[in-house]
């Protein structure tokens, strides 16, 4: 294989020092196995890598943190962007310009210096670009909308090795599809994202014991039926493994947590949450927090691990869906299942001023399920059983919570206009659909 010219970052092959480290990501199942890794440091490096792959007929994949990896790349060229992690805040425009490998923690910190907040999600270590290309449901999602709604420009390297600055004016159709269904259309080298004024919120996590989880789900259904846009909430439920690394009060217990973020006055937040507290016994405190601590209400695991998962955007939260979720993937499940339920609506349901590709905006809830990979097909079977049970109320799926190639195959997401763009921009199928 010929050397790649004009690349300043490391170019690594199997056996080279640092090659395996470049393949490591948050998702440890089905890792990429490329013939070549380009650890890009700039847009020029990305352009050179794509042109090399095109000249040699090699498939290309791109990765930052590895949180959302689905199908692995075998052979070909993997472009890792984690060295491209620059952030520039324009406080006058309220815009963050982020490079391809930037993670949300850097954007949150940089924006906070100007009294601004980004549409960041539950994990501060997730890559900004991958999250946003798939839509992105943030901590303040019901007030800020989908992260993709707030994208103002995208710098994209296409299969011909060209670098485009894509905006609503320069290429409206490509801009639309990139915002919400943009994975695999090229390599994004930078993105501009609109920020919002803010700095503090009222919230935290309330914990509910196993015996009260059915009542919690029923109460949550009623509670979320009429909430202001400024209150974003979700539920996560799982049986914690009985491991010494966990606090003793969690080991082996099935618990649900209600994650709450309210952007109005604290006393009003307390009043809004009171009916839910009255419905079921909870532990945990809510209070005012700086947005720089927003991810703490989710407490996402920071250690890489193997997992698979999928989701359903629900037309309504029928009690039958809640019953099926607990019966199939609740405390009695034969493998660990993390059940998630997100309240959507609010700004998430409204069309942005510039159209994007987020599907099924009118869905008021998102049901999620995730499991550790255990070497069997049992997690996948349970997930399919749950998705089939929820099918009568399912409008579709969102790209960001489909983990594992099987989930992507079982429930593909069709985006109007995307196939035509793929045929135009990448007729030879250079970019690996991961």
Image (cartoon, grey):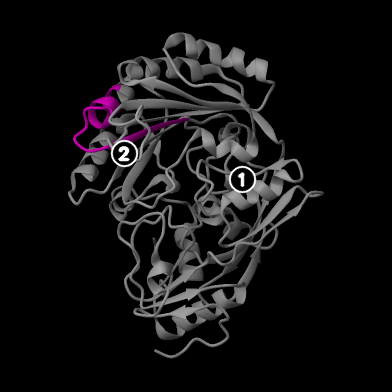
Going by the image, does 30 lie left or right of 156?
Answer: left
**Nearer to the camera, 98 or 155:** 98
**Nearer to the camera, 417 or 252:** 252
Q: Residue at x 50, y 51 (%)?
A: 126
Quarter of the image with the C terminus in it: bottom left
Q: Which residue is mark 2?
A: 244
**Nearer to the camera, 343 or 420:** 343
Quarter of the image with the N terminus in it: bottom left
Identify the element where label 1 is drawn.
Answer: helix
How packed mark 1 is, by other alpha carbons closer than 10 Å (few <14, some 14-19, many 20 or more), is: many
Q: Where's residue 69, x and y in %?
A: 39, 56
Q: Are marks 2 and 1 in contact (CB under 8 Å)?
A: no
Identify the element where label 2 is drawn.
Answer: loop
Q: Quadrant of residue 32?
A: bottom left
User: Furthest residue to the top?
Assistant: 278
Q: Which residue is mark 1?
A: 149
User: Furthest residue to the bottom?
Assistant: 2
Q: Residue at x 36, y 21 (%)?
A: 318
Mark found first going from the N terminus, 2 or 1: 1
Q: Quadrant of residue 314?
A: top left
Residue 351 in sight in this render? no
Q: Where's residue 396, x and y in %?
A: 40, 40
Q: Is residue 63 above or below residue 9?
A: above
Per the image, is 240 magenta? Answer: no
**Nearer to the camera, 274 or 357:** 274
Going by the image, does 283 lie left or right of 14?
Answer: right
For the record, the magenta segment spans 323-342
Q: Is residue 121 above or below residue 389?
A: below
């Amino acid at each position: 294989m010929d050397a790649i010219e004009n690349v300043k970052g490391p170019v690594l092959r199997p056996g080279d020092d640092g090659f395996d480290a470049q393949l490591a990501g948050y998702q440890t199942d089905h890792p990429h196995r490329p013939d070549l890794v380009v650890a890009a440091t700039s847009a020029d490096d990305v352009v050179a890598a794509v042109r090399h792959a095109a000249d040699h007929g090699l498939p290309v994949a791109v990765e930052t943190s590895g949180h959302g990896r689905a199908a692995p790349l075998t052979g070909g060229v993997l472009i890792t962007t984690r060295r491209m992690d620059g952030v520039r805040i324009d406080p006058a425009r309220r815009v963050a310009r982020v490079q391809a490998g930037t993670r949300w923690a850097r954007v949150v910190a940089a924006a906070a210096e100007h009294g601004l907040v980004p549409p960041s999600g539950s994990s501060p270590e997730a890559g900004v670009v991958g999250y946003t290309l798939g839509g992105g449901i943030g901590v303040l999602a019901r007030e800020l909308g989908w992260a993709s709604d707030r994208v103002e420009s995208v710098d994209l390297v296409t299969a011909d090795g060209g670098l485009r600055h894509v905006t609503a004016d320069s290429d409206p159709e490509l801009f639309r599809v990139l915002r919400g269904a943009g994975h695999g259309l090229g390599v994004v080298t930078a993105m501009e994202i609109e920020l919002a004024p803010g700095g503090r919120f009222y919230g935290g996590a309330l914990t509910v014991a196993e015996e009260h989880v059915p009542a919690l789900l029923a109460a949550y259904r009623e509670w979320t039926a009429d909430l202001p846009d400024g209150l974003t909430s979700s539920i996560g439920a799982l049986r914690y493994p009985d491991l010494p690394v966990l606090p003793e009060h969690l080991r082996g217990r099935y618990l649900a947590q209600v994650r709450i973020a309210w952007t109005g006055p604290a006393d009003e937040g307390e009043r809004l949450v009171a009916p839910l507290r009255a419905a079921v016994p909870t532990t945990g405190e809510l209070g005012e927090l700086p947005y720089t601590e927003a991810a703490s209400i989710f407490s996402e695991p920071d250690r890489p691990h193997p997992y698979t998962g999928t989701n359903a955007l629900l037309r309504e939260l029928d009690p039958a869906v809640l019953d099926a979720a607990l019966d199939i993937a609740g405390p009695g499940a034969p493998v660990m299942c993390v059940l998630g339920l997100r309240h959507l609506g609010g700004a998430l349901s409204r069309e942005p001023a510039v159209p994007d590709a987020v599907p099924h905006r009118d869905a008021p809830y998102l049901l999620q399920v995730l499991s550790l990979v255990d070497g069997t097909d049992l997690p996948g079977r349970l997930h399919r059983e749950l998705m089939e049970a929820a099918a009568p109320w399912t409008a579709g799926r969102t790209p960001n919570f489909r983990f594992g190639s099987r989930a992507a195959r079982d429930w593909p997401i069709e985006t109007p206009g995307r196939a035509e763009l793929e045929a135009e921009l990448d007729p030879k199928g250079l970019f690996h659909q991961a």
